[in-house]
Image (tube, rainbow, N blue to C red):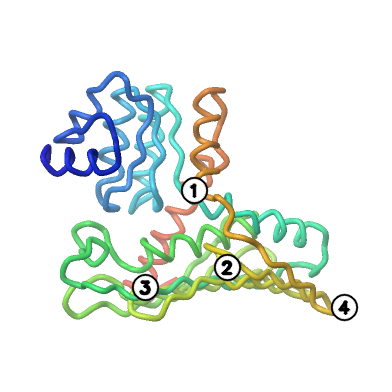
Amino acid sequence: DQARAEAYAAELNIPRAYGSYDALLDDASIDAVLITLPNSLHAEWAIKAARAGKHVLCEKPLAPTAAEGRAMFAAAAEAGVVLMEGFWIRFHPQLPLIREAINSGAIGEIRLIRAELTYTIADWGGDSRTRADLAGGALLDAGCYCVHIIRHLMGAEPHAATGFQRVHPDCRVDSTFTGLLAFDGGRMGCLATSMEAPFRVCCEIIGTAGRIHTDSLFGPSTVTLAAAGQPPRVEKVGPGTGMRAQLEHVSACIRQGTIGEITAADSLGNAATLEALKRAAETGRA
């Protein structure tokens, strides 16, 4: 509301405050918006922002369903604005190191990628991530990172998915979720995510001639390359400025009229995979 917005703006020396999202979109001086609303509201407000002529950086996950995602990109295309999904881990400084190790053949052909992201919800009664009506749950909130990084490093889309979930007895959202993705050539991706476990965010890429392991997809990390017949190579990587790099990238795309690093096809592939994993867990079928 207006009073809360004005108080927050004053705290951070922001010159203008708005009492509603519509009032913000009506401001012709605003070029772009970052949507950080609960998952169920992403499509509605990304579409409204696009129709108001605003470029959009939408926090992950793009939307709970691929159909909503397609509607978002259609609205952006019709309005001639940029829409990109916000996966700032794509701008983490460790990712070029990992991709280079894979592309160089240092670990042979990829056979398996494992990605995990777990954390603990402090307030199950007051956190939007625990609400089914807001498309909460571990898979969409945290598992989306795991699916994204597995697909990105595989360089392909999975053709099958299986999933298992623990549904919270009170909130009725998936509080812990595990999944398996099958890719062409017998390659597999495993993911594990939870909102009721100690914090952990890691990834391991296992190939026919070695493996790559990072102990953090977020902050400072240790990347270990263990190629067959060679001593492990360990690289310390700082936290970098992934969030800032993402904002600068989107700004450049807006100014230059170019397509973002995370394309519509990439985001829709992620949404479709998340949807398939959820359906598999709910039906017991791949």
Picture residue at 16% right of the left edge, 70% below the top: 125
Q: Which residue was labeled with disc 3?
A: 281
Residue 252 image point, x, y percent: 55, 29
Picture residue at 39% right of the left edge, 48% below the top: 59
Please give left or right for residue 44 compared with residue 53 in the image.
Answer: left
Residue 134: numbered disc = none
Q: Residues within 10 Å of mark 2 (few under 14, many from 20)?
A: some
Find the residue positioned furthest to the right.
229
Q: Amino acid at mark 1?
A: Met
Q: Amino acid at mark 4?
A: Gln
Residue 190 image point, x, y percent: 54, 73
Q: Which residue was labeled with disc 1?
A: 243
Q: Amino acid at mark 2?
A: Ala
Q: Are marks 2 and 1 in contact (CB under 8 Å)?
A: no
Q: Are marks 3 and 2 in contact (CB under 8 Å)?
A: no
Judge whether 16 appears above or below 242 on screen. Answer: above
Residue 134, quarter of the rendered image: bottom left
